[in-house]
Structure formats: structure tokens, C-alpha cells
Amino acid sequence: MGVDSHCSQTECNETGECLYGNHDRYTCEHWQTTEIAAEESSTEHDTQVAPWHSDALSKLDINLVSVQRRPHVIALVGPHNAGKTTYLAAIHLLCLREPVLKDFSFAGSLTLRGWQRIIESMQYPRDKNLPPSYPPHTPNSNERVPGLLHYTLRTNEDEGLQEILLTDAPGEWFTSWACNPDESMYPGAVWTIRNADAYLFFVDSDALAGDEPGVARSTIESMAMRLAEERNEKPVGIVWSKSDVKIDGVIEQQVETILSRELPDATSFRMSVRPQKGNDPEMMVESLKDTLEFATTKQPVAIDFQTDCPTGNPEDRFLSYRGNGHV
Ligand SMILES: Nc1nc2c(ncn2[C@@H]2O[C@H](COP(=O)(O)OP(=O)(O)OP(=O)(O)O)[C@@H](O)[C@H]2O)c(=O)[nH]1
Ligand SMILES: [Mg+2]
């Protein structure tokens, strides 16, 4: 006899959290546990025995990560070609080489094949006719959730575990979302922004230095304005990607002005995966580490809600709660 247990609510499955607020999902009325007859549950007849496939996670797999603790979601936001997937590949290549974060050690991943897919074109040895190159463009789709790459990290201090999910979404999603956040267009962009705990906002230096810097600047402006509206005070790191490419000083200044107007508290990073003459390659590594350090650091959440009930302890309303709706 086997047991199949799952949540019957689509929204809970999508977000990976119980929207009815149950910490223990087994106590939720929507959690369904069914006994399966021995022959049905027998692994002899199962072609797929592992509950995961090791590729980037999709909305069907979010439960796998969130079943024990809420994952920390890092959203990579930026237009097509901005360098988002290359950033992810560079991070993973670095993780294979050395510890990347000061306070955490690598403790596992449910998406090792997903990571491998994006790093393989950047690795030696390749086919002798093909030198290492960049990862392929992320295909556009109407998925409700982006591809999610996963790490489990162990805190060096107390050995506690933390789940990290990094989104790998096509840039087209965000360009469209910036003009029209209507969920029906690219629901995955809305999911990404809504569920993120931190954002890495990609500014493509190459596009700003290219033939149409004005178009690149207004794409950045509309995306930054939309993110400012939707981010809910969550932290934003601005990643000036492809920083090996020199941008015209005037354009750079204009973009900086836009960003400091729309995202005044954001932290900026310069990042490039292309070695530059005269620059220490370790500088590239340091900026990768700094961005990930920033995005994985949990910011204290300011809970700011209003109520008409008087309380003896206005700083902490939960401490004032005495049950049965009385404060
Ligand atoms: N000069 C330079 N070019 C880079 C760098 N990183 C990426 N590129 C170029 O930018 C292209 C796009 O990078 P991706 O990482 O695929 O960009 P993306 O944001 O994931 O793009 P989408 O998947 O289309 O949204 C690469 O194919 C490279 O040609 C860099 O550090 N320096
Ligand atoms: Mg991509």
C-alpha cells in the first residue's frame, strides 16, 4: 500500500506556500492524502522513481523545495540579451571552483542538470571545432513560472539550511511586463516579481554603447519605473552587465539619474565575464560574489499595517495579541 499526498489548491501549488496560512500543511483541509493499492504504488512498474528530474524547476516542482522551509527567491530582471543567464552560469562555474558566500556552504541542489545545461557551452573541453561560448538565449514561453535554479545552503554559524531559487526568465517577459503588467500577457513575469525576495536588475552596457542607446535607455527606464511600483520595498541590486564595454559618458549619466530616481536605495554592481586587458581576473570573481552576497542576504521586513484596535505595545502588535480577536 502506498500513499499519495498533495494540496488540491492550484494557487498553493504555484506559490509553494499554504495560502490559508497553515504552517503544517497536513492540517489544512485542502491537503489530500490517498492510499494507493500496492500494485499501483509499486516502483517495479514506475519508470520514474525519483520525485525530481534535476532540470530547472517549474511550477509543478515548487513543492519539492518549499515543503520544509520557504525558499529565498532571487529574481533576475532585465531585457533580452542583458546577460542574465550568463550571470547564472558564471555563478555556478564559480561555485564549482570555490566557496562563493562568506557565511554559507553549498549543501545541495535539486537542479544540477539545469545548472549543467547553462554552463556547458562555457566549459572546456568542448568539441574541438567549438570554443567556449555563452549560454543560449532563454526561449520565450507563456509559462506561469520561470525556470528556477536551486541551491541548498548551510549557514556556517549554526548549520541551519536555506533554500535559494534563482529565476532564469526570458527578457521578453520583462519588456512586455514593463509596458503592460497585465497577467494574461506573460504571467511568469508577474509571478517572478510578486514572489521574489530580492531583485537583480540588469543594465546591459553593450546595448547602451550600441547603435540605439536611446531605445536601450528607455527600456531601462520603463522597467525601472515598473519595478519601483511593484517591488514592495524589497531589495534591488543593479547589475551593470558586460562592464567590459565602454558606455558614452552622457548616456551613462542619464541612466544613473533614472535609476537613482526610481530605485534610490538600490546597490550597484559592475559585472563582466569577459577578461579585460590589464584587469585582475579576480576582480570579475569579486563582483560576482558581491552580487550573490547582496541578493542572498535577508533584509528585515518592516511590517506596517493599520488597525483600529488600541494596543499597549504599538511596536510589536503580535506581542500584544491575546487571542480571540482581542488585543
Ligand atoms: N562583452 C560581453 N558580452 C557579454 C557578457 N555576458 C554576456 N554577453 C553577451 O550577451 C549575450 C546575451 O547573454 P545572455 O546571458 O544570454 O542574456 P539573457 O539576459 O539571459 O538573455 P535572454 O535569455 O534573451 O533574456 C551573450 O550571448 C553574449 O554575447 C559580458 O560579460 N561581456
Ligand atoms: Mg537568458
Image (cartoon, helix red, strand yellow):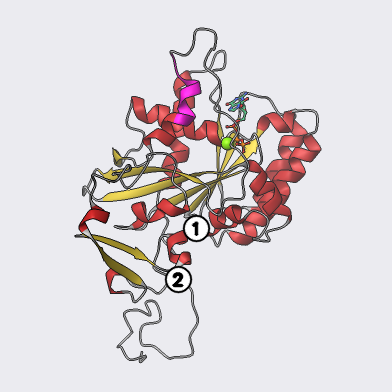
Magenta stretch holds residue 302: no
Q: From the image, which quarter does the N terminus lie in?
A: bottom left
**Mark 1 burial class by Cα count in 10 Å: few <14, some 14-19, many 20+:** some
Q: Quadrant of ligand 2?
A: top right
Q: Which residue is mark 1?
A: 195
120 part of magenta stretch: yes
Is residue 208 rendered to the left or right of residue 151? right
Number of numbered tags placed on the structure image: 2
Q: Is residue 53 left or right of residue 83?
A: left
- Whether the residue under disc 2 has CB within 8 Å of ligand 1: no
Distance between mark 2 and mark 1 Cα atoms:
17 Å
The secondary structure that most of the magenta stretch takes on is helix
Residue type at tag 1: Asn
Q: Residue at x 46, y 27 (%)?
A: 119
Circle 2 residue: 303
In this rendered view, identify the residue nearer to me: 325 or 5. 5
Along the line of sight, the residue nearer the viewer: 292 or 67 = 67
Taking the image as shown, residue 225 lies to the left or right of residue 281, namely right
User: Is residue 323 toward the left or the right of residue 59 in the image?
Assistant: left
Q: Which residue is depicted at the point 51% across and 33% down?
A: 87
Q: Which residues are magenta?
A: 117-124
Kind of residue at badge 2? Ile
